[in-house]
């Protein structure tokens, strides 16, 4: 099964998000965080998280880019449990048992989004807030969309 991990081409996520996801942590879109937002909520770093941020499942920070890779069943189960705990702690779900079906749905939706996507492909998310609420658009970047300057590390010996 495929899933998404946070990747960074530079240090910009540390500057644009209140909390940046750690490189390599598993991610989901995390659009549920914005389900009751209005235009008034879309300011500063919160706006950036809303507009382009994937949700990391360790730090619960945001990241702009994710890469598709294989996930083991035990890792997937740990993500479901961690997300259910997050729903209880941060969102007031009544119990882990009550939160598990929703956490499972979120994790399975990410796995479905990555299903059939070639390993190491980079993905982005874009969100809009309209009359009908939040809409999400996902994009798989073509290989030629990334230039060497985006990933190269320059230095001197």
Image (cartoon, rainbow, N blue to C red):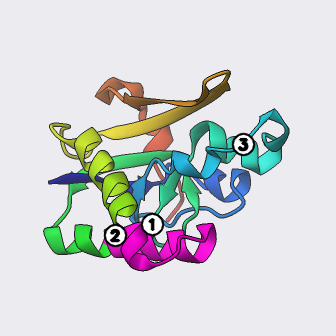
Local crowd size for mark 1, using a 10 Å CA cut-off: few (<14), some (14–19), many (≥20): many
Contact (Cβ within 8 Å) of mark 3 with mark 1 = no
Q: Where is residue 86 shown, x and y percent of the image? A: 51, 72
Q: Earlier in the sequence, mark 2 or mark 1?
A: 1
Q: Earlier in the sequence, mark 3 or mark 1?
A: 3
Q: Residue at x 39, y 58 (%)?
A: 102
Q: Is residue 100 above or below residue 2?
A: below
Q: Is residue 82 magenta?
A: yes
Q: Where is residue 66 shown, x and y percent of the image? A: 40, 48
Q: Where is residue 20 shown, x and y percent of the image? A: 61, 61
Q: Where is residue 59 shown, x and y percent of the image? A: 54, 71
Q: Is residue 62 magenta?
A: no
Which span of residues is magenta-colored? 79-100
Q: Which residue is mark 2?
A: 79
- The label shown at residue 57 is 1
Q: Which residue is mark 3?
A: 37
């Amino acid at each position: 099964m495929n899933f998404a991990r946070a990747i960074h081409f530079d240090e910009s996520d540390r500057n644009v998000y209140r909390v940046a996801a750690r490189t390599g942590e598993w991610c989901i879109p995390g659009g549920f965080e914005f389900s009751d937002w209005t235009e008034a909520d879309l300011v500063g770093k919160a706006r950036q998280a809303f507009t382009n941020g994937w949700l990391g499942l360790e730090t619960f920070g945001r990241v702009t880019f994710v890469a598709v890779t294989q996930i083991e069943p035990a890792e997937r189960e740990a993500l479901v449990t961690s997300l259910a705990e997050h729903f209880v702690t941060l969102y007031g779900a009544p119990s882990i048992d009550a939160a598990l079906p929703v956490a499972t749905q979120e994790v399975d939706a990410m796995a479905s989004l990555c299903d059939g996507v070639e390993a190491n492909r980079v993905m982005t998310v874009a969100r809009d807030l309209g009359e009908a609420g939040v809409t999400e658009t996902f994009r798989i970047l073509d290989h030629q969309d990334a230039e060497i300057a985006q990933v190269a590390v320059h230095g001197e010996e």
